[in-house]
Image (tube, rainbow, N blue to C red):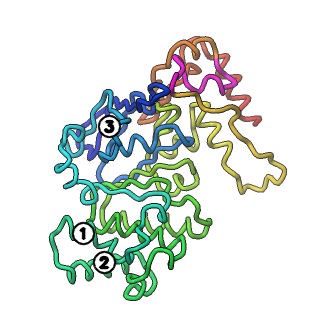
Amino acid sequence: MQENNHLLTVQDLSVSFFTYAGEVQAVRGVSWYLNPQETIAIVGESGCGKSVTIQTVMGLLQSPPGRVKTGSVQFEGREMLNLSPKQLREIQGNRMTMIFQDPLSYLNPTMRVGEQIAESYRLHHRVTRQEAEARVLEMMRLISFPEPERNMRAYPHQLSGGMRQRIMVAMALICTPQVLFADEPTTALDVTIQAQIIELMNSLKEKLRTAIVLITHDLGVVANMAERIYVMYAGKIVEEGDARDIFYHPKHPYTWGLLASVPRLDGEQNRSFTYIPGTPPDLLNPPAGCPFAARCRYATRACLSRFPEETSFGGRHKASCFLYYPGAEENLRQAMEGRQQS
């Protein structure tokens, strides 16, 4: 992985949770990078390690039981994993922020939303209450919040789900961060509001020149936002590439499954709903080979014994799958024919 000019670089990150049942290997050797003013997406099923990775990068990993076993997280060339709590607080909520997936769980029900938006701005910029209020109004107008002067004095329960999510966006962006993590930002919103939130984030990215890391299982959201995509499964990156590569030329069987499970609007009225059979592996005792092997119809003996090395398909497109190893041409042909028929 190249590290030149990257805003944020995660290299060989492994994170485990040590419980009474044993060691849960939540993240296993994950590497990715983010460029300035870029949007990337980390996609995968629930429990694949997406959120744990981001919490570790943000310095929010609860320890114990969580522990970083190996790896490096560098922000502007500075190692994040070695920072003291005070040094982390200077970055958290200021230069690096996060939108969580459930606003009601993170908004304080006893505080007016304007006060909650202003809180991090006052902490990091040492401004007066009046200056902070002016900044809040500016931010609420920027996100096209209706009646900002009145609604900044509302409590979270008085706002709709879409309005609460806009408040979360305002809270995350009020300090004009360099990196914004969005953890399932459109979950539990109806499709119209989802589209509005996506449009809002794309617009603010251009205005504020913020880089975005999108964490989601919804490939529909990814298609409208991300420039590059990392596909994550059972704590590992199994495929990565530009959005066009992942959507039009996917290589890993798990990526095929994710794409096939997305509802289509192409007129195929009788098309049956497709899902990935089986369940993810138990990360208390992860498999020695490819973690997707037990659910993959194209798995071979090699898939069960060791994790495949990356195969490059040109540009930034890579996948870890034995289908592309020398000698697997017949398996690949059958896999491609099966995918076209499904």
Tell me the kind of residue under disc 3. Answer: Val
Which is the main secondary structure of the residues drawn in magenta?
A: loop
Question: Could you tell which of marks 1 and 3 lies nearer the N-terminus?
Answer: 3
Image vertical order of residue 195 relative to residue 96, above or below: below
| Image coordinates for residue 193, horizontal then vertical, percent | 56, 69
Image vertical order of residue 290 relative to residue 83, above or below: above
Residue at position x 27%, y 65% in the image = 176
Question: Are the residues at dot 1 and dot 2 in contact (C-beta closer than 8 Å)?
Answer: yes
Question: Are the residues at dot 3 and dot 2 in contact (C-beta closer than 8 Å)?
Answer: no
Which label was assigned to residue 136? 2
Residue at position x 31%, y 27% in the image = 70
Question: Could you tell which of marks 3 and 2 lies nearer the N-terminus?
Answer: 3
Question: Are the residues at dot 1 and dot 3 in contact (C-beta closer than 8 Å)?
Answer: no
- In the rendered image, which residue does mark 3 sit on? 10
- In the rendered image, which residue does mark 1 sit on? 121
Q: Distance from label 3 to label 2 (Cα)?
A: 33 Å
